[in-house]
Image (spheres, helix red, strand yellow):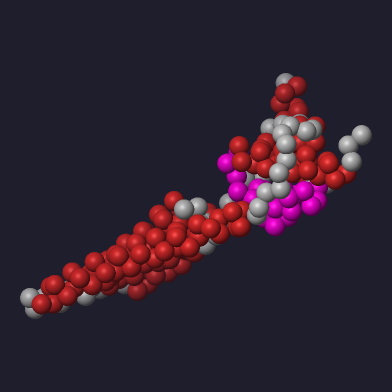
């Protein structure tokens, strides 16, 4: 008979494998279960085991049976937390993002100075550089999967577009910033949409049909 400690390791191994195959992060899986990513990490380190109801939810999410989650599949090795695994690369990716964003502003400043030298003052260049730099930042954090603050960056990008239009278009009514407020609300609501697990009985009824 399998010991409790062995069962924890089996569940941890299967949970890691199934989550990775589904392309979910610990945070995304936690949101689907209404648990924190720290709890998911604890399960995947074999320090705790989900209760029966959560096991049923996991089975629904990964389209497997509870027995699949509780049965030994592969040899388990203690994993590091996702944050620890990414820590080695966080410095270089942060530097890449910083260099890219600063590069946009450097180009804008270079263009501004070049025009200034021929007695042309186009401060509007910086109004355009603002949303461009935000867009570069948004793309890079998506590429490097640094999505913890993604909703705030998207909100900043949307707001920067309104600021750019306000600065570049004389007479642009400030009241249109009221539209920006609702646009920001839509961004935050959209970024917090989460997939809800199906009710445990739905898949069974569907198979029976």
The relative height of residue 146 versus residue 176 in the rendered view (above or below) is above
Question: 193 or 36, which is in the foreground?
Answer: 36
Across and down, in percent, residue 142 comes to 46, 53
Q: Which residues are magenta?
A: 22-49
46 horizontally vs 4: left or right: left
121 horizontally vs 44: left or right: left
The relative height of residue 45 versus residue 150 in the rendered view (above or below) is above
Q: Which residue extends farthest right?
A: 1
Residue drawn at (53%, 58%) of the image:
88
Q: Quadrant of residue 115?
A: bottom left
Across and down, in percent, residue 39 comes to 73, 55
Across and down, in percent, residue 169 comes to 24, 69
Residue drawn at (89%, 41%) of the image:
3
Q: Is residue 29 magenta?
A: yes
| Quadrant that contains the C terminus | top right
Question: 2 or 31, which is in the foreground?
Answer: 2
| Quadrant that contains the N terminus | top right
Across and down, in percent, residue 196 comes to 66, 45
Q: Is residue 109 magenta?
A: no
Residue drawn at (21%, 75%) of the image:
123
Q: Does residue 62 appear anywhere in the picture?
A: yes
Q: Does residue 53 appear anywhere in the picture?
A: no
Question: 26 or 182, which is in the foreground?
Answer: 26
């Amino acid at each position: 008979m399998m010991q409790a400690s062995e069962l924890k390791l089996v569940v941890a191994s299967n949970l890691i494998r199934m989550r990775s195959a589904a392309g979910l992060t610990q945070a995304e899986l936690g949101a689907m279960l209404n648990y924190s990513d720290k709890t998911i990490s604890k399960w995947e380190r074999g320090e705790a085991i989900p209760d029966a109801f959560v096991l049923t939810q996991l089975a629904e999410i990964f389209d497997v049976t509870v027995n699949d989650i509780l049965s030994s599949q592969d040899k388990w090795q203690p994993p590091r937390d996702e944050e620890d695994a990414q820590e080695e690369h966080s410095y270089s990716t942060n530097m890449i993002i910083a260099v890219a964003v600063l590069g946009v502003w450097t180009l804008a400043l270079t263009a501004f100075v070049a025009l200034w030298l021929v007695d042309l003052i186009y401060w509007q260049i910086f109004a355009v550089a603002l949303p461009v730099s935000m867009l570069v930042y948004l793309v890079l954090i998506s590429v490097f999967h640094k999505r913890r603050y993604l909703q705030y960056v998207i909100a900043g990008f949307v707001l920067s577009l309104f600021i750019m239009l306000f600065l570049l278009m004389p007479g642009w009514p400030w009241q249109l910033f009221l539209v920006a407020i609702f646009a920001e609300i839509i961004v935050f609501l959209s970024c917090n949409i989460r997939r809800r697990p199906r009710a445990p009985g739905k898949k069974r009824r569907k198979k029976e049909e």
